[in-house]
Image (cartoon, rainbow, N blue to C red):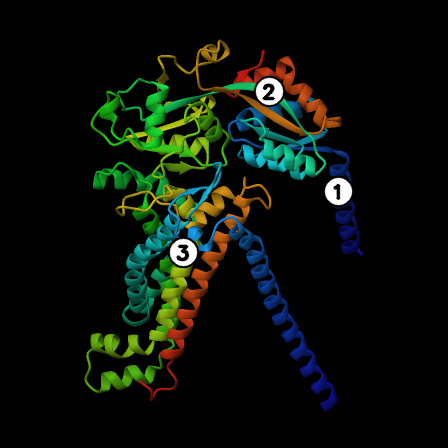
Amino acid sequence: MAVLRNRTEKAIHWLFLSIAMVSIGILVLIMFFLFNEGLPIFKTVTVQEFVLGHYWYPTDDPADYGIFPLIVASLFVTLLSAVISIPLGVMTAVYLSEIASRRVAELVKPVVELLAALPSVVIGFFGMVLVGPFLQKAFGIPIGLNLFNASLMLAFMSIPTICSIAEDALYSVPNSLREASLALGATELETIVKVIVPAGLSGISTAIILGMSRAIGETMVVLMVAGGAAMLPGSIFDPVRPMPASIASEMAEAPFRGEHYHALFAIGIVLFLFTMAFNLVADQIAQRYKQSGEASL
Amino acid sequence: MLRKTGLLFIALAFLCMGSGAASAERLSINGSTTVLPAAQKLAEAFMKVRPDVTVSVAGGGSGNGIKAIIDGTTHVGNSSRFIRNSEVRMAVEKDTYPVPFRIALDCIVPVVHPGNPVNDLTIDQLRDMYTGKIRNWKEVGGRDMRVVVISRDSSSGTFESWGDLVMNKERVVPSALTVPSNGGLVQAISTTPGAIGYIALGYVNKDVKIVSVDGVMGSEENTISGRYPISRPLFMFTRGWPEGVTLDFINFVFSKKGQEEVKAAGSISVY
């Protein structure tokens, strides 16, 4: 009997190990493919010209492959959407887990999660048909498809991510901390600001950074509402062309293994490095503020 | 027992469906969004004549259509421009010989927001707007309003034709908005008062206003007579000389009925 149990244990161990190995293997292969297809462009242009060049004219003869405006566009769009979505997402999470009565929370939470269920193309359409013309009228600007519009739409998309992960983090803060704080005479607000949020900080920062990586990699929305102009934005109401939008709109026609094709994969590499950096930062923060037990606060 | 019979019946039904689909011929068409409306109408009409054939039609841009012909992923590749030398080379390397069929004519018309008072522009003015030299509508006799240049993205055959016929190979200003389809462009123009864009004649609707070029209005008659400067032929490409169903389809496109469908889709028939 004991032998059989031992064997089952071992079998399960190997099963899980091999499943994990398969997924890691697939990831490594995708990375290999990405670099394999992207790196040949650097035979034509130097890394510096590629990353810092100001002109993106991939189909001209001779072509220009400078993605600096695309990088700037991606960063600004992500940053602006962070400014909008972090306060909204985190505060909603605090409200849902600490303040709201159970009935209200049960009503609000599904609504927030419904936002996450909206397909990005629907959000893009909404931004194109409703928000764009509205921005034009409200701010008296010539173009409704711009950086600001794209940031708004991306904020819509990252709020549910940020909110639900942050809420989980706050929810898992041990109750004894709340009780201790209240017992010492702190008000509810003091408890939230000085005890609960710091205790959940590791989870909250992970939530924020995951929300941001979602925003920087999101394609459909920026393709539809960012305007698609490959230039350095002078204001938040200028049209921009973030990296994913370029890849999506041009990959279809780029001749297989041609220069343009390699250039698009090289943009993919840059994008990959950005999201990887985000995730590393998230990991660092999560490690640093890790709440180990109740005594460490 | 009853359950088993039921299962067997379902399995049989699936088998029949499978074999039925296998005997029906398939034809796939892919490419230019300019040719798309005509291709859709042609496909529908063709399926009525030949119910044994299933035709699938997809858009995606001229470059896409030609690429699909080279890669062998479609039977018919639509394009609103002729094949490039580099593409011919690539096809030959893969042992394919794309054959062009000029199935229709089309003209590209500059369009503006319906509220814009400007009615006519010269080719030079259009080029200056697209290279960023003209930045205000005042300079071409319009209101004091910034010109918002809207262009198709680089995978579009319309973009390419515009580059040949208007831009004289000069570059479109980087601040131009780019839109991935004719329909998206109409949407963007209709909501932007200062916008200028260009679309295939078949996509013109009441949300946008056509601007005449050098005093000539973009229309069927002016395109056929050759007076309208921004016109081009539309193509369907096949992999080598068409055979079988593909040949039947191409013949149908050039039949009287087929060319009527081309006309109904807003393009200009070849005869």
Q: Which sits in the foreground, A261 or B11?
A: A261
Judging from the image, mark 1 belongs to the subunit labelled B
Dot 2 lies on which element? strand
Query: For the residues carrying marks 3 and 1, which lies nearer the camera in this image?
Result: 3
In 3D space, how far apart are the residues under numbered discs 1 and 2 (Cα atoms)? Answer: 35 Å
Residue A293 at least partly seen: yes
Q: Earlier in the sequence, mark 1 or mark 2?
A: 1
A139, above or below A37, in the image? above
Q: Which residue is mark 1?
A: B18
- Are the residues under marks 3 and 1 on the same chain? no
Q: Position of residue B104 (x, y in %)?
A: 56, 19
Residue at position x 34%, y 60% in the image: A108
Q: Which sits in the foreground, B238 or A66?
A: A66
Identify the amino acid type marked 2. Ile
Quadrant for the C terminus of chain B in the image: top right
Judging from the image, mark 3 belongs to the subunit labelled A
Q: Which residue is mark 3?
A: A216
Q: Position of residue B120 (x, y in %)?
A: 32, 17
